C-alpha cells in the first residue's frame, strides 16, 4: 500500500508532524510512504532534512498566497499529473493549511481518497490566522476521513456537524516529536529549570503564570524561561521584570528545540484552553515533568501520565502545583519513552482504519 502524507506549511510543527508520520508508515510492512512538503519548509532547509518525494512550491506572504490561488487551475492540473505518476492509494493531510483545498481537488480528480488530521476544531483567542479555520472546515466537509487528535476535538467536530455522513471519524493521540537524545533532568546540578515554550498568545495563560509566581513568592532556586513568538502583552512585560525569569519573544528554529528541552527540568503549560499539546508530548518523551492546567484535551492527554501534574486553570492551583514540583520533583523514568514506536502506533492505527475508506468518484 502506498500512502501520501502532505503538509505545505513553511514553519512550525506541521512539516515535522508530516515527516514523522511518513516515517511511521514507511516502517510498516507492506507500506511505502510519499512525503510532500513545501519547498520553503524550514525542516528541509535545516540539518538532516527528511526525504521529500513531492516538493511543492507554495508561497511567501499574503501576496504570494493570492498569486497561488489565482493560478489554482494550473496548480491543480500539475498536482493531478504528479499524483497519477506517484499512484498513492490514500493521501493524508498532516495539518491543514491555506492551499490544501487545491490538493484535495487534485486528489479527487485522480480518484485518491483523502484523510485530514485535525489538531484544533476552533480558533484559539489571539490566533493570527482567522481564515484558516474557515478553510479547514471546508476541507473537513470534503474529506473522506477525518482524524481528531483528541476526543475533545472529535466532540467539537461532531457538535459543528462538519463531517459528512459517509466519512470516517477517527480519534487518535498526538505522538511525541523526536528531538534527539537529551540529558536527564537536573543533570546540570544547578537551580531548578522551568520552561514555558510555544506561541505566546492569550490562550496560553501567561497571565496565570505571572499571578502564580506572585503567590509562590521569591524562589532563588528557580529559573524560568518563557520562549516563543507572539505579540507583546502585559503578561509578558510583567514576567520580563521578575527575578530569575527571562522572556525570549522570538521565532524558535527547528534545530533549537532539542536544546530548549535539554535545558529544562520541567515544562509548564498554564493554558486557558487547549485541544492537545505537541510540546507536552515531546517533554514527556524526554523524561521532563509537565505542569499543566486541566483544560480541553490536556486532561485526556495527560491524566494517565506519571510525569504530568494537572491543576485547575487558576493562579492559586497553578502556584500549588509549581510549589509541589519545586519541593518534590518526580523521579525521572529509568528509560525515556520511544517516540519512534509512538509514531509507528499512530501509522498502524490510521492504516487499519483507512483501508475501508472508499475511493471518490474520478473527475475529468
Image (cartoon, helix red, strand yellow):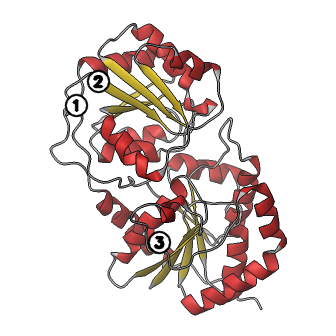
Determine which residue is flagged by label 1.
186
Quadrant for the N terminus, please. Answer: bottom left
Residue 28 coordinates in the image, percent (x, y): 34, 77
Contact, mark 2 vs mark 1 (Cβ under 8 Å): yes
Toward the viewer: 281 or 45? 45
Residue 31 location, quadrant: bottom left
| x and y, in percent, of residue 208 in the image | 53, 20
The residue depicted at 32 percent of the width and 57 percent of the height is 339
**Where is 220 relative to 12, above or below?**
above
**The disc label shown at residue 167, or none:** none
User: Depth check: 174 or 130 in front?
Assistant: 130
Q: Mark 2 or mark 1: name the one nearer the start of the chain.
A: 1
**The one of 364 and 185 positioned closer to us in this rendering:** 185
Secondary structure beneath disc 1? loop
Q: Please tell me in which quadrant of the rendered image residue 311 appears.
A: top left
Q: Is residue 96 left or right of residue 297?
A: right
Which residue is labeled 2 in the image? Answer: 192
Q: In this picture, is 53 found above or below 345?
A: below
In this rendering, is residue 155 above or below 226?
below
- Of helix, strand and loop, which one carries label 3? helix
Residue 319 coordinates in the image, percent (x, y): 41, 16
How dense is the environment of label 3, judged by Cα within 10 Å: few (below 14), some, or many (20 and up)? Answer: some
Q: Is residue 164 visible?
A: no
- What secondary structure is marked by label 2? strand
* Front position among marks 3 and 1: 1
Give residue 353's mark. Answer: 3
Amino acid at each position: 500500500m502506498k500512502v501520501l502524507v502532505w503538509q505545505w506549511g513553511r514553519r512550525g510543527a506541521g512539516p515535522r508532524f508530516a515527516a514523522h508520520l511518513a516515517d511511521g508508515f514507511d516502517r510498516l510492512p507492506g507500506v511505502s510512504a510519499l512525503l510532500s512538503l513545501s519547498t520553503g519548509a524550514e525542516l528541509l532547509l535545516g540539518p538532516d532534512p527528511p526525504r521529500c518525494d513531492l516538493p511543492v512550491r507554495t508561497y511567501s506572504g499574503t501576496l504570494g498566497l493570492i498569486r497561488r490561488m489565482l493560478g489554482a487551475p494550473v496548480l491543480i492540473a500539475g498536482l493531478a499529473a504528479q499524483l497519477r505518476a506517484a499512484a498513492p492509494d490514500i493521501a493524508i493531510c498532516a495539518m491543514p493549511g491555506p492551499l490544501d483545498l487545491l490538493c484535495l481537488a487534485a486528489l479527487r480528480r485522480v480518484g485518491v481518497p483523502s484523510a485530514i488530521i485535525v489538531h484544533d476544531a476552533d480558533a484559539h483567542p489571539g490566533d493570527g490566522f482567522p481564515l484558516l479555520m474557515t478553510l479547514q472546515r471546508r476541507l473537513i466537509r470534503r474529506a473522506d476521513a477525518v482524524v481528531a487528535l483528541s476526543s475533545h476535538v472529535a466532540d467539537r467536530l461532531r457538535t459543528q456537524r462538519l463531517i459528512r455522513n459517509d466519512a470516517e471519524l477517527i480519534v487518535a493521540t498526538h505522538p511525541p516529536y523526536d528531538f534527539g537524545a537529551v540529558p536527564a533532568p537536573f543533570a546540570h546540578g544547578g537551580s531548578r529549570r522551568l520552561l514555558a515554550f510555544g506561541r505566546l498568545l492569550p490562550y496560553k495563560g501567561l497571565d496565570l503564570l505571572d499571578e502564580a509566581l506572585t503567590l509562590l513568592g521569591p524562589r532563588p532556586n528557580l529559573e524560568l524561561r518563557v520562549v516563543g513568538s507572539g505579540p507583546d502583552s502585559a503578561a509578558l512585560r510583567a514576567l520580563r521584570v521578575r527575578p530569575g525569569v527571562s522572556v525570549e519573544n522570538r521565532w524558535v528554529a527547528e534545530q533549537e528545540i532539542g536544546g530548549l528541552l535539554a535545558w529544562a527540568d520541567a515544562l509548564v503549560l498554564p493554558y486557558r484552553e487547549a485541544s492537545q499539546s505537541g510540546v507536552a508530548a515531546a517533554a514527556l518523551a524526554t523524561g521532563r515533568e509537565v505542569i499543566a492546567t486541566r483544560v480541553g484535551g490536556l486532561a485526556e492527554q495527560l491524566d494517565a501520565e506519571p510525569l504530568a501534574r494537572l491543576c485547575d486553570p487558576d493562579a492559586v492551583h497553578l502556584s500549588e502545583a509549581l510549589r509541589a514540583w519545586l519541593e518534590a520533583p518526580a523521579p525521572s523514568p529509568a528509560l525515556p519513552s520511544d517516540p519512534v514506536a509512538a509514531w509507528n502506533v499512530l501509522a498502524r492505527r490510521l492504516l487499519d482504519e483507512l483501508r475501508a475508506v472508499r475511493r471518490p468518484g474520478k473527475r475529468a
